[in-house]
Image (cartoon, rainbow, N blue to C red):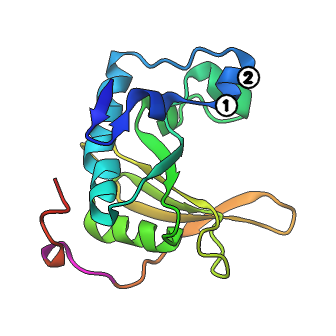
Amino acid sequence: MKLSQNFSLKELTQSQTAARKGINNNPNEDQVVKMKALCKNVLQKVRNRFAKVVTVSSGFRCEALCVAIGSSVNSQHAKGEAADFEIYGISNRELADWIYHNLDFDQLILEYWNEDEPNSGWVHCSYKGEGNRKEYLQALRNSEGKTYYQKCHPAEGPSKSDINDSYIQ
């Protein structure tokens, strides 16, 4: 099933952990509707803008998969509202900043990015539709290896009016 021009349900539900543990990671109808909204309003627009493959490392996670990987069963991944992704050859910081300046989203997290390694980490982005917070965070690890989050400040970028409309569909 296609969720948008370049994204499929299979792509947003695949999980090595689910396959290894025999977990059925299939969403219900409501979750599919939310994944379509995420693809239409975030992932497809990113794909159109950069004209490169957007690699989704984690999309939908059913409750059993959340438990298996130590994630919250209430996460936006479990609702079908979030994906972790990157574009090889594009700095994850550049990608996240572009999303911040140009798209509507709920939460955007630049995960474990290191300025000395532009392709380090990945981008997490969620989309709820109504009531999006447009919250931009960076996930980092402290000296004990524990994750913490801080507000991320994007580099200056083009305003929506500066964007070529052919990229945004």
Magenta stretch encompasses residue 5: no
Few, some or many residues within 10 Å of mark 2 (<14, 14–19, 20+): few
Q: Secondary structure under badge 2? A: helix
Kindly identify which numbered label has been placed on residue 16: 1
Kindly identify which numbered label has been placed on residue 149: none
Q: Position of residue 160 (x, y in %)?
A: 18, 72
Q: Position of residue 6 (x, y in %)?
A: 32, 42
Can you say whether 81 is above or below 48 in the image?
Answer: above
Few, some or many residues within 10 Å of mark 1 (<14, 14–19, 20+): few
Q: Nearer the viewer, residue 102 or 75?
A: 102
Relative to 35, 139 lies left or right: right
- Real-space Cα distance between discs 2 and 1? 6 Å
Q: Position of residue 156 (x, y in %)?
A: 35, 85
Q: Secondary structure under badge 1? A: helix
Q: Quadrant of residue 166?
A: bottom left
Q: Nearer the viewer, residue 5 or 133?
A: 5
Magenta stretch encompasses residue 159: yes
At a point 52% along the width and 62% down the height, the residue shown is 88
Q: Which residues are magenta?
A: 157-161
Kindly identify which numbered label has been placed on residue 20: 2
At a point 15% along the width and 71% down the height, the residue shown is 164
Look at label 2 and name its amino acid. Arg
Q: Is residue 104 visible?
A: no
Mark 2 and mark 1 residues within 8 Å of each other at the beta carbon: yes
